Every structure is written in structure tokens, then in C-alpha cells.
Image (spheres, grey):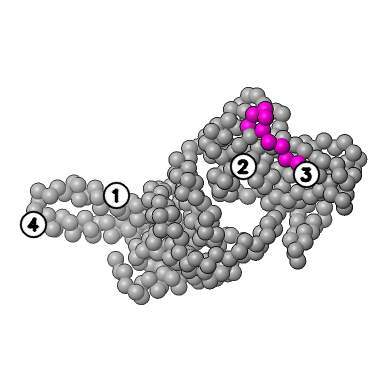
Amino acid sequence: MAGNGDDKLSREVAIAASLEENGIKLKTKSRAVAALDGLVGAMLDVPTAFLEGIAAKKRVRDSIDEQLRHAQAAAAEEQIAGRPELGGVLIDAVLIDRARKQKNAAGVAIEVVEAMKALPPPGAESDSTEAPSDEREHLDDDWMNMFIRYAEDASSDQLQQLWGRVLAGEIQKVGSFSRQTLRFIAELDKETAENCEWIASFAVGDWIPKYSKWETGDSLLRLVDLQRLGLIEGVGAHGPNRRFPIEDEGYSALFAFGKGLIINGPPGKALETSAILITRLGQEVFSLLPQDTSGKGLRRLADLIDKTDLTRISFGDVRHEGGRWYMASPETLWEA
């Protein structure tokens, strides 16, 4: 395989070109180039794989298989010419394992670029102020080494997509995923993944309104399991409460995932509901799930709120411009 400076430059140009349309900042591109070079290095002889995206996966796998056959033939020649007692089966197994890891890592690398192209442009987040720019050009070495080990074992397209989203998120914002989260994802089973999707659909930012129907039965068991795994806190009869008072202007506003809930009522009235808190691990894991753009969590909260003395509850898309929040075309969910 080629591994000279020209090949590396070609990879860097291809990666940068594939991210050009998304308005990604220069430092983020630098991190992407460094991270992908650490993940696959000179393995991808054809840098256009980054430009072609998912369609290049099969061609990359075929290329690595061909390299494996050449390596096996070369090893066999060495044995015949030298010391056959070294053990052809062992050498063959090592080569096959290395090729497997290369194919998996290459698949993840392609998914990383695809995931980065799908990320919102810098500053496009609507439910939080823009995070300060991270000037680091490289990801943490220990974090990256752990990630590579997991990526090399990701054999299915689904797992490669998952790890691709992880590295894309870390490149976009360093510190998005802790090493604890990497270990959790690597051991994630189907039942836990389904439970994560279930509870995340009720989330309002970094917390979840607690419903009385969750106090018994299958729902309680699922919550207890998620709490045991460290994803949530506050399951049980004496969990925390979330309080949102009506301000002097006569309303209380809650924002989550680009949506907003405006609760109108008498100033000074305190609204309160039992809550389940989402831990840092939970927030990082849930961020990998498909984003809810319908605002189901806020809509469910509107149904849960005690409406005594309230006059109206409205819901809609929110925008953050010039340091102020705006709700576009609010929908009335409830009115006295």
C-alpha cells in the first residue's frame, strides 16, 4: 500500500472537499483530517472514497481483500523459502484478522464523513447559545486509541454508522463523548438500546417529566434498569422536582430541541412537576438517537401540567437571534 506524503495530501484534500458545503470551520476540518488519518492512515489508497461516501464501502472492502491475498501469498513464499515450521496457519489467521479490522475501520471512516456532512452548520443550534470555538487540532490520544479499537470491531453497517456518528460528534465538539460513553456503546445490547429510545422520546432537554403510570409494571422495570446503568437519576417515589415559575411578563418558557412551550398565567405562580434527570452519560448516549423534531416531549409535558389559574399553553418552533428567543407561528395546545 502507498503511504507517502502525496497520498496523505490527497486524503486531506478529499476529506476537506467533502466537508466544504457544510460550512465547517477550519479547525474542525483539521481535527477531521487528523482523526481519520489515525483511524485508517494509508489504508485507503483511493482518497476519493471519502468523496463517494457509502457507495465506496464495497470497493474499499474488495481492495483490502485483494491486499490480504497478496500478503498471504508473500507470507507463503517466505515460508517455503525459509522456515516452514513458523506455522502458516497462525500467520494466515493474523493476516485475516488484520484485514477484518481494516475493513471495519475503513467503513467507519466513510460513515464519519457522511455524519459530518449531515451535522447542522456551526451556530445553527436553536435551543442553546453557540458553544465557544475549540481551537484544538487533534483529539485526545487516549480517547482516539480507545475509539479505534472499537471501530475495528464494528462489522455491521449499523455499528459503523453508530461509531461514525460518535467520531463526527467528537470532531465537531471535543469532549462530546467521554471514554465511559465509548465503553457503554461498545457493550450496548438490543434491549437497552430500545429502552433508551423509549425514554428519550419523553425528554425535555436534560430531564424527563415523571408520569404516574410509570410507578408500576414494565415501565418501572425499564426505568430502574436505565438508572442502574447510569443513564438517568430520580426513579422512585422521592425523586427531584422541576420548578418553572410564571415570570412578571405573565408567562414561563421552556425550550428543547428547537421547540418551545409558552405557559401563560398569573405572575408569581409556581409550576412544578416530578422529574427524572438525564445524567451526562445518558445525554451523550441519547444524542446518538434520531432527533425528535416534533417536540413530543414538550407536548406531553403540556398535558401533564396542572392548569389551575393558567390561561393558555402554546407550542412552536423557536429561533435564537440577537440574544433573544422567538417563537414562530405558535400553536395553542390548551386555553382556559
Tags 3 and 1 touching, CB below 8 Å:
no
Q: Nearer the viewer, residue 296 or 283?
A: 283
Which amino acid does the dot numbered 1 rest on?
Asp
Task: Decide which of tag 3 and tag 2 comes sooner along the chain.
Answer: 3
Residue 166 in sight here: yes
Q: CA distance from mark 2 to mark 1?
A: 39 Å
Verify whether residue 236 appears in magenta.
yes
Q: CA distance from mark 4 to mark 1?
A: 24 Å
What SS does tag 2 mark?
Answer: strand
- Other residues around mark 3 within 10 Å, as few (<14) / some (14–19) / many (≥20): some
Which amino acid does the dot numbered 2 rest on?
Ile
Q: Position of residue 150 (x, y in %)?
A: 40, 49
Question: Foreground mark, 4 or 2?
Answer: 2
Which amino acid does the dot numbered 4 rest on?
Gly
Instruction: Identify the residue under disc 2.
Output: 278
Tags 3 and 4 touching, CB below 8 Å:
no
Q: Quarter-wise, where is residue 196 in the image?
A: top right
227 versus 105 height, above or below: above
Q: Quarter-wise, where is residue 108 in the image?
A: bottom left
Instruction: Identify the residue under disc 1.
Output: 97
- Other residues around mark 1 within 10 Å, as few (<14) / some (14–19) / many (≥20): few
Quarter of the image with the N terminus is bottom left
Boundaries of the magenta span: 235-243
Task: Decide which of tag 4 and tag 1 comes sooner along the chain.
Answer: 4
Instruction: Identify the residue under disc 4.
Output: 82
Quarter of the image with the C terminus is top right
